[in-house]
Image (spheres, rainbow, N blue to C red):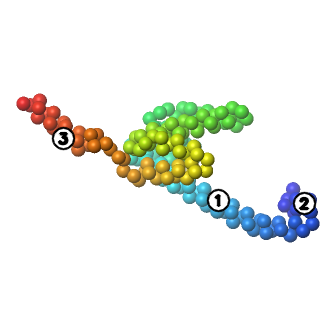
Amino acid sequence: MDLTSIANNLGPGFEQSVPMIAALLVPLLLLAIILAIGAYIYTSLTMYITAKKLGTTPAWLAWIPFINLALQAKMAKMSWLPLLALIFVWIPVLGMLIAFGIQVLAVIWLWKICEARGKEGWFSLLTLIPFLGGIWSLVLWGLLAWDDPKVPENKSPQKKAAKKKTAKKAIKK
């Protein structure tokens, strides 16, 4: 069944508007494809940089769809084995439960990655907000990749080195 036969069923005059509707939908579809590719490249790049900063190897897994979830688990220092359940995602009811479970795990992994990079863990919960969560996810991965972690004053490397020197001097006396 093509658009012309559908238009004929809808009534007279509608078949002239089919090309106009197609002319509007094709650019929107192309825009959506371009935005999706751009979001994929951006997210993969920021995930790659974040993995490098956390010392997680192999960081290049960020560029492989679905496998990058295993990289997220590795960055969070958690097991990636629950991802094996994605094999059964095609089973009707079980698939929905598995997809929900993987989403929960992804938020937990992101929480731990945020904490490892010196950010608040609850930032990951904002990714669950419909529509805005997707935009926040892009912002959050950018923060994780390019923002310097905020290290508390007493945990800075300079303070730790000074404490060690003071402790060594105290032991020598």
- The answer to whether residue 70 of the structure is visible from this angle is no
- Determine which residue is flagged by label 1: 32
Lateral position of residue 102 relative to residue 74, left or right: right
Q: Could you tell which of marks 2 and 3 lies nearer the N-terminus?
A: 2
Q: Residue at x 48, y 41 (%)?
A: 122
Q: Label 2 sits on what residue type? A: Leu
Report the disc number at residue 10.
2
Q: Residue at x 54, y 39 (%)?
A: 106
Residue at the far left: name it: 173
Question: What x and y, as percent, mark residue 79?
Answer: 49, 32
- Determine which residue is flagged by label 3: 162
Q: Label 1 sits on what residue type? A: Ala
Question: What x and y, as percent, mark residue 52?
Answer: 40, 47
Question: What x and y, as percent, mark residue 11?
Answer: 92, 63
Q: Nearer the viewer, mark 1 or mark 2?
A: 2
Q: CA distance from mark 3 to mark 1?
A: 54 Å
Q: Residues within 10 Å of mark 2 (few under 14, many from 20)?
A: few
Q: CA distance from mark 1 to mark 2?
A: 28 Å
* Secondary structure found at label 2: helix
**Quarter in which the C terminus is drawn:** top left
Q: Nearer the viewer, mark 3 or mark 1?
A: 3
Report the disc number at residue 135.
none
